Image (tube, rainbow, N blue to C red):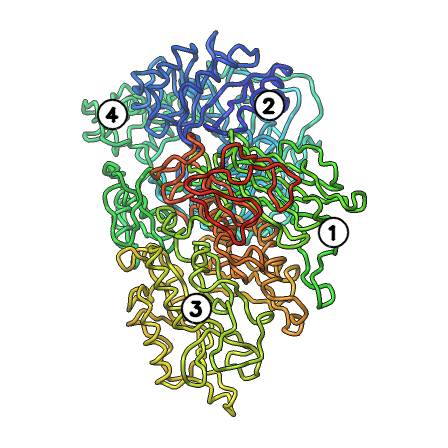
Amino acid sequence: MKLAKDASIDAFALNMASGDDTNNIALPLAFSAAEALGFKLFFSFDYAGNGSWDKSVVTGMIKKYRSSGAYFKEGQKPFVSTFEGPDNATDWQDIKKDTNCFLIPDWSSVGAQPAVQLGNGVADGLFSWDAWPKGPANMTTYPDASYYDFLGSKPYMMAVSPWFYTNLPGYSKNWLWRGDDLWFQRWQQVISLDRQPDYVQIISWNDYGESHYIGPLDGRQYEAFTIGKAPFNYALGMPHDGWRETLPYYISMYKSGSASITEERAVAWYRVNKNNACLDGGTTGNTANQLQYEYSPNNMMQDRVFYDVLLTSNAQVQVTIGGVTQQGTWDQEPYRGVGMYHGSVPIGSASGSVVVTVNRGGTTIATINGAAITSDCSKTDGKNNYNPWVGSGRGPPIAAVRTYGDVKQLSCVKGFGVYEFTGVCDFACANGYCPSAACTCLKKGDATPPKETGMVGYPLPGKSGSFQGLCSFNCNHGYCPNTVCGTTPNTGVVLSYSPFLPPACTGGSGSDAFQGLCDFGCHLGFCPMAVCKCTATGILVQTPAKTSESGTYPESDDHGLCKFACEHGYCPPVCAKLPTDNTCDGSNRMYSVEDVPLGEIERWSNDGQKLDHISGSGDQYVTIVNLTPYRMVHTSSPTPYQFTVWDFGDIPSGKARKNKAAYDLSSHVGSFSDTNGFANYRLEGTDKTFQVHVTSHMPDKYERRVVFDLGGMGMGWRELGFPGERVSVALVITGSEDFGYVNSLQLNNIAWMRSMYDIIKYRQLRHVVVPGSHDAAMSKISDSGWLGGGIPDNTETQSLDHYNQLRVGVRYFDMRIASIRGGDFWGAHVSGNTGASPMGSTGESLDDLILATNRFYTDYPGEVIVWVIKYMTDLNTDHASASARYWDADMVDKFYTQLERITNRCPPNMSNNTMFDKRPINEFLDANNGKGCVLLITDGNLLDGLPKDRPGSGIYHLNDYFQTDDYWPNKQTTSDNAPLQVDHMLGHKRDKGNTDAYTIMQWQVTPSAGDLISGLTLQLIANQESNPALYHYGVNKMTPDYFPTVILHDAVGLFHVKDLSFESYNPMMQTLVIGLNLYMVTQNCIVSSISNPLVAAKAKAKTLGGSPTTTLHSGFKTFSGVIFANGTVLDEAPPGFCRTCSYNDTDTIDHAANGTAVGRRRWTRGTLSRPVHVE
């Protein structure tokens, strides 16, 4: 604020989005600081960011702060503005009545004339956001003149901005408008308008994402680059402070007509990357989103060094680039030589450091040492940075020198017009007549027009009435161009379009799928140059009224073509239809960029023989995964008296935290009971709370228990034993207040894809995150007739059979199928693809796998399952050579014929013009009359000449139809494997670009078989090391821009190696992928076209049991009962149930009495031989 006040700025417009939690935090601080400094503030309610404001909230905020001495007022009325919100204009009738506010809104999107009439003329004046030129031209005052025309005597707030460049794909923004001379020329327009504005608003103080900031750089405010998925931070190292140096002069000239100079100053600005120095990054000059003709930025931006110099008399300027100096010139000098000088020099082929020097008579007045001009784009992702570097320099203090006269009393002596108005405006403005409705004045002074001739001029027939005054003045002073003016009386015509608007695209073409879309869009001015070619220009054609539909192009970035076309009545089959109120615009991005310490990854092997879990350790870990829009705030924890470490903390949105509790075993030998280990959490900005109980159980050292109590969220309670010492147990919560919440207490969303059909249906297959099963058929050692020496410890990768793997959420299966001695087909796990060395074994038979799949589709239709089938060879150790182990044509035919028994295969004879991984998933979800389908992909070891697939039966070959990025670094420990998997994931940005792939993150480790003979097993390692690390390490590396498609792992759905009952299946992975798809991927508008469902739930909702105020998306289920560590499930808590107790097999902790009635049955604590689900 002090910097702004020093620059003669009167007030800050506080732009605020609806529902932003930071408003209530920031406003008291802002007003306190402003009051102390004597600075002013006023509200600007942003109706575009998070949607409309509730008028009662607006009223309350104005009433609360209008009495502050820092609130800016018009007379006695609190001054209020908006950014957009014309649809809510009528709200202001009540708001003004209740607050007596003075309303100057920005309703630029509807234009000046409609904006004046909105809400029955409720606005006291208007603000126009139109501060930048369109196309390769300078800024004009035509938009300002139109506001004056319709406002009448009402006040007008004019916008001034120095620059505009944005590259934020997450907000569908990547364009620039010409800056160059804009800062100087726009201020000249403010000063020189024939009717000066009542207010001037500078855009902006700190909008780094649009490059028009004049405030200082602030690394704490760069979130726009992360949220908006900028390819690089283009504000970094690009200060704009120099533009503030000229503000005291400009503001004084605007307010009083003169200014006093006590210090000569120089400001220079330029882009450090010349045109064509690097890639343009897809940036356009102008934007089709606003129906503007798009240019290459190279055809709009000038490679020049621009400078403003405030002088008391003329001086010389020199610009040195890379040691080569050129003499600068002035494009404009001030009235009588006192004031602001402006000019520029071409950069040409020069590069290197820039020095601007101003001197007079051999004495240096000011020097600016600037950043180097370079073609090195290694720090900007290979792209041009179109954001300028701005610097300044000052001369020594001098005795005050005042500008001559009052600029308000002077006449225009320099101006310009556009198109047909160029000549007449140039002449008239130079001679004192410069009507803002037709011309733009840039300088005032003493006009000396030529002598009057007495000729009376008129517009030619058919010409705009705007020529009337110009022809009259010009012809009378000796300039009467016969192209627009004549001497025959004529008032001109009222055109149906503005003659001052730049030409729009009126026709165009595109290739392949875009031909029809480009033809439609370009005719209406929407012609994105990345996918269309504009072939005709002219007057903008009126667009048809919007429909209730929108659309998206599922296969690649269509730059908004489908959205525009579908919204205006043309929605061809290449577009996926969307309702207009459910499209992603990037405004509700919630992912936190806050770093969270990565949890330590336990090593399964210290010496190749045992788990590295310290014997007798008191350490206990709980990982909490937050896939909600809210920060999970650790509010309090009662003092635990037997813990030496209690490390629980906040979990930002989109992150996970591995929390630690360590028991003091040395001080409490024989007594390990501590019932005080409660961590209390609150979802920030909501009334939702939950507890984590980490308690010990006398006289047990182990197993200890953890309780997740979600009662404060209207959900359930679950007690879990830890799978092993130092092994982290995870709680996953996703959802929101609008959507409802899904948690990992129970496995209750088995058909999870169908449950979120409306959310994922338009995503490409590669953009739907799924759990994957590594070596999926190896849930047992089978008697197939082939013995390869494999034992369960080193061969069984899975605990659950195929049907139950599907039930815990797995949708990608690494299927390794072999024939046994030329006979039946079995799943296998062998040391080589052909089992040449006798190491390995067989698992489930293909018959059983097919039966399980068909059974699953009967029980849970509507899912998409991917089988990638490997091996496809014969296991027979009697074969003398490897070649004898390859299938012949009959065996291949037999195999494909058996696969045809899968009843819900994906459709036959699908085209491979678009790879399956790049197709929208609804093509597969909707197959078989909405039952979904199994996508059968072969990747076997077949001999040349044999059919690699059978497309006519829905059996397709990997490389021909389906492309994956499957990374296997072959590491023995998770601490080695996980960083490599994460790095690989971060090399595949989710932007539909070349690196965006169907990525398979192989989270399982690969120990040698010899290490797995002393009590260690593949499943134990997965259960106690690699799978837990996914939640506290892997999740924290995932973002809306970087996430895997498949999370491949061992021991899917296994919580404890000793318990394979369904009630004890692990729901964490299922909930995680629901959360990643629901929370993470929906924030990426490039790959997910619908609006973020967690912020604006559009689907039908239902009430959750236990919480009448919480709603849940109709496709999901949640759990509000009780689950005990032994697997006993109660659908609802019994009367008097103690939510803060832990229940074990001792009598040391109070609990509900045996025999407590629940529903139609009774439950008995501690006497159940196996879990019982209580109805």
Secondary element at image label 1: loop
For the C terminus, which image quadrant?
top left
For marks 3 and 2 on the same chain, the one whose residue lies earlier in the sequence: 2
Q: Amino acid at mark 4?
A: Gly
Query: From mark 1 to mark 4, how far is it between C-alphas?
Result: 90 Å
Q: Position of residue 748 (x, y in %)?
A: 43, 48
Q: Amino acid at mark 1?
A: Ser
Secondary element at image label 3: strand
- With respect to residue 293, does 248 lie above or below? above
- With respect to residue 905, does 771 lie above or below? above
- With respect to residue 186, does 754 lie above or below? below
For the N terminus, which image quadrant?
top right
Secondary element at image label 2: helix
Instruction: Report the residue marked by disc 1.
Output: 617
User: Label 1 neighbourhood size at 10 Å, few (<14), some (14-19), many (20+)?
Assistant: some
- With respect to residue 1085, does 187 lie above or below? above
Q: Position of residue 771 (x, y in %)?
A: 48, 57
Instruction: Report the residue marked by disc 3.
Output: 868
Q: Give the residue at x 58% y 51%.
A: 1031
Instruction: Report the residue marked by disc 4.
Output: 465
